[in-house]
Image (spheres, rainbow, N blue to C red):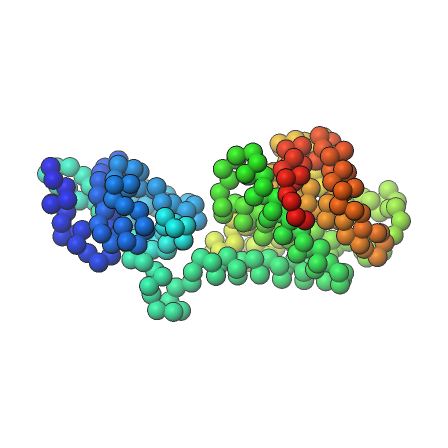
C-alpha cells in the first residue's frame, strides 16, 4: 500500500500534517511539518508520535486524546511540543481516524498558534514569567514584616534553580523541565507560614525557649494552610502543579535526613526531593547572609557545615550536587 499517494490531499495542506498507524507510529509527515518542527521525515517516520513532546502539555489533554482515539473518534486540543531547535511549538491539533483499505490511520493536522494575531494567544514563556511573578508577590506579601526578607527569598529561588539543575545533571535523574522550574519558582514560598509567628519569637536574637521553639515549628503547618486557602479559590490548572510542589516545600523543608526534623519526622527518601533541595539552599543562604541578629559566615565555612551534617540533616546526594555549583 502506498500510503503517501492515498493520503496526498492531506499532505498538500499548508498546515503541518502527521499520519500514524493504529499503534501511533508515524508513517509520514508533510513538508510543512518538516519546515515548522525542523525534523526531517527520515527522522520522524517509524518513531512514536510523541517524539517531540515537551512535557508541558497537561496530562489530562493526553488522557482525553487517548480516550477519543481508542473509540475511533476525532479529537481536537492544544499541544505544547518542542522543535528541533529547542523552541516551544504551541499548536491546535485535530486528529481524525480514517480507514484506508481496511487499515486504520490517524491524521493529525496542526495549526501553529504562534502565528495568530497578537492577543489571541499567550506564549508559554509569558505564562511561565507570570507564574513566577505571582509566586514572588505572594511570598513577599506574606513576609512583609521583615524589610530584608525579599533579598533572602530571591536568593533562595536563584540558588534553588542552580541546585535542582545541578542535581539532575550530576545524578542523571532525567527530571522534567516543568518539574525543575516548578521547584525553583515554588522555593520562594518556603517560609510563608512565618507570617503567623509573633515577631518577638521570629526575630529574637538569642536562643529560643522550648515553648518558643514549639511555636516556631508550627510555621510549616501555617504556611500549608495559607496556601490551601489561596488555591481553593482557583478554578483552573494554571498554577496547580506549581502549588503541589510548593505544598511539599512549605511542609517538609525542615525535615531532616535522619528523621529528627519537623513537622512530620519524615526520614530519608520519605522527604520529597523538592523539600530536600530547598532544605540545603535555605540553610546555606541563611548562614551566608548578614541579619540584624547574626553575622554572615564565609562560603567555605557554610559549605563545610553542609558536609558535616549530610546523612543527619541533609540528603548526602543533594549536598554532593550542591558542591558542584561554582558560583553562589
> Farthest residue toward the front?
326
Is 169 drawn above or below residue 282 in the view shown?
above
Quadrant housing residue 48 = top left
Please identify the quarter of the rendering in which residue 326 is found: top right
> For the point 86% across and 42% down, which residue is it?
210
Which of 63 and 115 lies nearest the eye of the viewer? 115
Q: Quadrant of residue 97?
A: top left
Image-based side of 18 in relation to 321, left or right: left
Q: Up-down: is 308 above or below 183? A: above
Q: Is residue 314 left or right of residue 24?
A: right
Q: Position of residue 178 (x, y in %)?
A: 49, 47
327 and 222: which is toward the camera: 327
For residue 239, side relative to residue 66 (left or right): right
Residue sitting nearer the eye, 227 or 299? 299
Using the rendered image of the protein, determine whether residue 78 is visible from the camera's viewpoint.
yes
Q: Residue at x 31, y 47 (%)?
A: 39
Residue 247 in picture, x, y percent from top left:
61, 47
Q: x and y percent of residue 202 in the render?
A: 81, 53
Q: Quadrant of the N terminus?
A: top left
Residue 224 visible here: no
Count the marks: how many?
Answer: 0
| Residue 113, horizontal then vertical, whole percent | 34, 60
- Residue found 36% across the figure and 61% down from its top: 114
Residue drawn at 70 percent across, 58 percent down: 151
Amino acid at each position: 500500500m502506498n500510503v503517501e499517494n492515498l493520503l496526498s490531499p492531506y499532505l498538500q495542506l499548508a498546515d503541518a500534517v502527521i499520519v500514524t498507524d493504529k499503534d501511533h507510529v508515524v508513517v509520514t509527515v508533510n513538508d510543512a511539518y518538516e519546515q515548522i518542527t525542523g525534523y526531517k521525515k527520515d527522522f520522524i517516520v517509524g518513531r512514536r508520535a510523541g517524539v517531540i513532546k515537551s512535557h508541558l502539555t497537561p496530562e489530562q489533554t493526553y488522557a482525553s486524546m487517548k480516550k477519543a482515539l481508542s473509540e475511533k473518534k476525532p479529537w481536537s486540543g492544544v499541544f505544547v511540543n518542542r522543535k528541533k531547535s529547542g523552541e516551544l511549538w504551541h499548536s491546535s491539533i485535530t486528529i481524525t481516524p480514517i480507514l484506508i483499505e481496511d487499515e486504520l490511520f490517524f491524521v493529525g493536522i496542526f495549526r501553529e498558534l504562534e502565528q495568530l494575531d497578537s492577543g489571541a494567544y499567550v506564549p508559554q514563556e509569558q505564562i511561565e514569567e507570570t507564574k513566577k511573578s505571582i509566586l514572588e508577590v505572594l511570598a513577599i506579601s506574606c513576609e512583609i514584616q521583615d524589610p530584608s526578607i525579599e533579598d533572602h527569598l530571591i536568593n533562595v529561588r536563584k540558588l534553588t534553580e542552580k541546585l535542582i539543575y545541578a542535581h539532575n545533571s550530576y545524578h542523571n535523574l532525567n527530571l522534567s523541565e516543568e518539574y525543575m522550574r516548578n521547584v525553583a519558582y515554588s522555593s520562594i514560598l518556603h517560609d510563608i507560614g512565618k507570617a503567623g509567628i509573633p515577631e518577638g519569637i521570629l526575630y529574637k536574637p538569642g536562643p529560643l525557649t522550648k515553648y518558643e521553639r514549639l511555636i516556631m515549628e508550627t510555621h510549616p503547618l501555617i504556611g500549608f494552610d495559607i496556601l490551601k486557602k489561596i488555591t481553593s479559590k482557583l478554578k483552573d490548572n494554571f498554577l496547580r502543579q506549581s502549588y503541589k510542589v510548593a505544598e511539599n516545600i512549605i511542609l517538609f523543608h525542615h525535615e531532616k535526613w535522619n528523621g529528627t526534623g519537623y513537622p512530620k519526622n519524615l526520614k530519608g527518601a520519605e522527604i520529597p526531593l523538592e523539600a530536600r533541595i530547598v532544605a540545603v539552599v535555605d540553610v546555606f543562604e541563611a548562614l551566608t547572609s548578614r541579619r540584624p541578629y547574626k553575622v554572615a559566615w564565609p562560603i567555605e565555612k557554610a559549605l563545610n557545615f553542609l558536609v558535616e551534617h549530610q546523612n543527619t540533616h541533609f540528603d548526602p546526594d543533594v549536598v554532593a550536587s550542591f558542591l558542584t555549583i561554582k558560583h553562589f
